Amino acid sequence: MTFPPTFDPPGTGAVVVHTSGPWRAPGHAAAFVQAVADLAALAVSVDTEGDVRLSVEATRRQQVLEDAAVIDQAIGVLAETHGLAIGPATDLLVTDARRSRTSLADRARAVIDALS
């Protein structure tokens, strides 16, 4: 006998009960198996969403780290090419990003790309 989840989250499948003979369990046994199917589907759907959230968060953190590295590199380039200390070079990058209405990371990438 097959018990699909009653709320049908996508891709969760079903609980299948195999018996040696015809299903003759009382109604409460079927209700119990249905509850197990619903709980299993809920656990799978929550875990999948949790994995997606963790994956998105990990990707976001990786992007932040990459952006920070590019920004630091661009500040170093500006400091070196303009003979500035780190503070004024940072101010220059921030001002330029605001003026060009781009993110700090995008402006930093443009500074680095201009060297190539």
Image (tube, grey):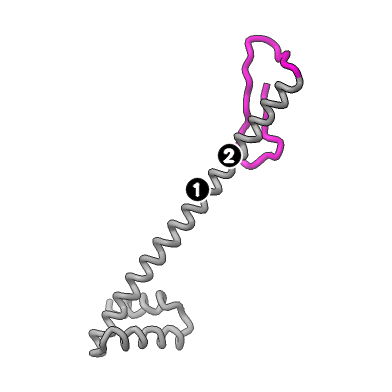
- Taking the spot 40% from the left edge, 84% from the top edge, the residue there is 94
Highlighted magenta segment, given as a residue range: 1-26
Determine the residue positioned at 24% across, 86% down: 81
Q: Residue at x 26, y 87 (%)?
A: 85
Q: Which mark is residue 51?
A: 1
Q: What's the residue at 45%, 88% (across, down)?
A: 99
Crowding at dot 1, Cα within 10 Å, few <14 / some 14-19 / many 20+, comes out as few
Mark 2 residue crowding within 10 angstroms, few (<14) / some (14–19) / many (20+)? few
On screen, 61 above or below 91? above
Decide if residue 85 is on the left or right side of residue 94: left
Residue 95, percent across and down? 41, 88
Image-quadrant location for residue 39: top right
Three-letter code for the amino acid on which mark 1 is drawn: Asp
Q: Magenta stretch: residue 8 in it?
A: yes
Q: Quarter of the image for the N terminus: give it.
A: top right
Rendering quarter of residue 113: bottom left
Kind of element beneath mark 1: helix
